Image: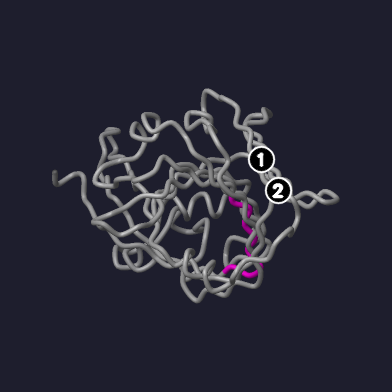
Amino acid sequence: MKISDVKKNAFAMPLTSPSYPPGPYRFVNREFLVITYRTDPDALSRVLPEPLTFDEPLVKYEFIRMPDSTGFGDYTESGQVIPCKFNGVAGGYVHSMFLNDDAPIAGGREIWGFPKKFAEPSLSVVKDTLVGTLDYSGQRIATATMGYKHRALDLDQVRKSLLAPNFMLKIIPHVDCTPRICELVRYYLEDLTVKGAWEGPGALALFPHALADVAELPVLEVKSAVHILTDLTLGLGEVVHDYMKD
């Protein structure tokens, strides 16, 4: 293979059989269960990287069901998003993500820097309850429950909240294990349609784990529980802060 061919085809690993196709990535019937809770502000300060800041010590614990996604297929995801601000603009910092599909793990980490790890999340309706669970290495580390579709929400307001910027820390090591890339990346959801949104009573239990410690941001008080059904496109990212230049 000639050098020109390598440069032409090298958009992802491995070179001759990439784990995912080039974007954009469209999601149909993407379903969210989001439990917003109050946590320990000192614990939050330890994990939220500067220059991001927070006003209130809140965390959004999410379970996301994705039955139809371009290039990534059918999978489920779970993790924590921290409401934050960047240069005074409100958004969300993606702190942890756990999912059960190799392609979006590889694509998410390589393109945007999503903090994705392999685990076994689930989101389903059990009689009158929407139930999200997350198992890592055979151990239950998160369980969320919500009363199913108790009260409808204003779809325009929900859509507006989902259009806020999202941030993550992209880290790629050099061959000697020193950081070669360390960047704060911002992305947005695009072409967003909210098909339905509901609120209801919610509960969340988190359990410590040596390799997936979602409980390091403890649940002190559940503030809200929402259930959202959408179609959307995952927008590609942009670098807003380069830690290697500091």
- Secondary structure beneath dot 1 equals strand
Whether the residues at callouts 2 and 1 have beta carbons within 8 Å, the answer is: yes
> Quick one: label 2 or label 1, which is nearer the N terminus?
2
Question: The disc labelled 1 sits on which kind of residue?
Answer: Ala
Q: Quadrant of residue 91?
A: bottom left
Q: Please report the bounds of the magenta region as a residue range.
A: 27-34
Question: The disc labelled 2 sits on which kind of residue?
Answer: Met
Disc 2 and disc 1: Cα gap in Å? 7 Å
- Secondary structure beneath dot 2 equals strand
> Chief secondary structure of the magenta span?
strand
Foreground of the two, 210 or 104 = 210
Foreground of the two, 224 or 218 = 224
Q: Label 1 belongs to which residue?
A: 203
Image: 79 above or below 187: above
Q: Is residue 120 magenta?
A: no
Q: Label 2 belongs to which residue?
A: 146
Q: Is residue 32 magenta?
A: yes
Give the crowd class for mark 2: few <14, some 14-19, many >=20 residues within 10 Å. Answer: many
Foreground of the two, 67 or 132 = 132
- Residue 212 is at least partly visible in this image: no
Residue 192 place in picture, x, y as percent: 52, 73
Residue 179 place in picture, x, y as percent: 26, 39
Q: Residue at x 70, y 44 (%)?
A: 145
